[in-house]
Amino acid sequence: MDKISRIYCEKLKLRAYTVESRTTVRDIVKIHETTPNATVALGRVINAAALLGATLKPESDQSLLLKFSGEGPIREIHAQTDAHGNIRAYVANPKIDESGYFDSINFSKAIGAGLITVIKDINMKENYNSITPILNGEVASDIAYYLTASEQIPSAIIIALNLDSNGEIKSSGGILIQTFPDTDPSVVEKIEYNINNMEEDLGTRLNRGDDIISVLSEIFDNEALQVLSTTGLRHNCSCSRETLLSALKGIDNNEIESMIREDNGAELTCTFCRKTYNFSVDDLKSLL
């Protein structure tokens, strides 16, 4: 089962979040029929969003939006998650490999120069909004920069998403490690050293069936870890007929009248889950 875990290490004064997401990512990329570069880009952003979502108050009504938008051919990747482990996502151009532009997996080339947008709904009067530049074209390091620059929380992130020769997802997950104000700087240096000197990457370990908590334990020099909570992770789109009908209210009346006259109704498709909703003439007339 895919899951998110929240972990505390008292000895090192560090907190960590892990996500195991192979089934969830497989479900989402299947919906969008992505080619390999789009699969990797979308999957990495899903993992990043799940890790950021793990920092929300568990089982609350809090939610989070993460968006990478750039000048590259993939254009935009958008993920939304909540404190219950529900996540949905889409990529603007799921077929980028068909252009012949790529000869290997390259997220930096796919997204290009651009921005990262994070919007948190944490039940305050206004949402928390942050926009930071895409610096490295790597999801993990760019999200670590966002956390340090915008939230002032020094963080280390590992994101794994491995494909087989057929472009199918073999493993998917991630680890987020964060400090506290009283975390010793020498601990930070040690964790950075351990991450940079891992004998095998996280994707390889997950594909082999290794437990992600055991991987984290090795990074933490096998110090005692306390798993504070675990939440299931799943693809779950929040779209509904009522939501899309409400969205139609924002369309100019002339356009709605045109739909009634020329199309005898309307058909809308959710960008996230590709589910189609049909609206009759009477539905449209109710909006006028």
Image (tube, rainbow, N blue to C red):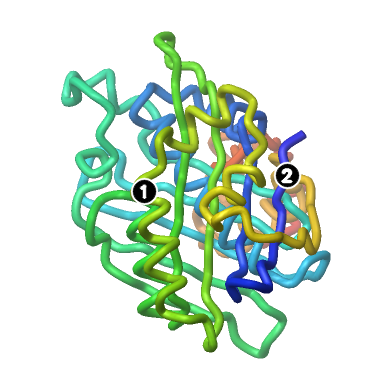
Q: Is residue 115 above or below residue 269?
A: below
Residue at image x 54%, y 52%? 175
Location of mark 2 (residue): 3
Left or right, 163 with respect to 288, comes to left
Q: Is residue 96 visible?
A: yes
Q: Is residue 86 above or below residue 56?
A: above
Q: Nearer the viewer, mark 2 or mark 1?
A: 2
Left or right, 247 with respect to 3, comes to left
Label 1 Cα neighbours within 10 Å, binned few <14 / some 14-19 / many ≥20: many
Location of mark 1 (residue): 76
Q: Image quadrant of residue 206?
A: top right
Residue at image x 34%, y 57%? 141
Q: Residue furthest top?
A: 166
Q: Is residue 248 visible?
A: no
- Between 95 and 144, the residue placed more toward the observer is 144
Residue 59 picture location, percent across and down: 83, 65
Residue at image x 41%, y 66%? 117
Residue at image x 36%, y 73%? 131
The three-letter amino acid code for the residue at tag 2 is Lys
Residue 215 picture location, percent across and down: 58, 43
Q: Is residue 157 above or below residue 218?
A: below
Q: Quadrant of the N terminus?
A: top right
The three-letter amino acid code for the residue at tag 1 is Glu
Left or right, 9 with respect to 106, comes to right
Residue 70 picture location, percent across and down: 26, 53
Left or right, 187 with respect to 266, comes to left
Asked which secondary structure carries label 1, the reply is strand
Q: Is residue 248 above or below residue 267?
A: below
- Between 101 and 151, the residue placed more toward the observer is 151
Residue 32 picture location, percent across and down: 51, 28
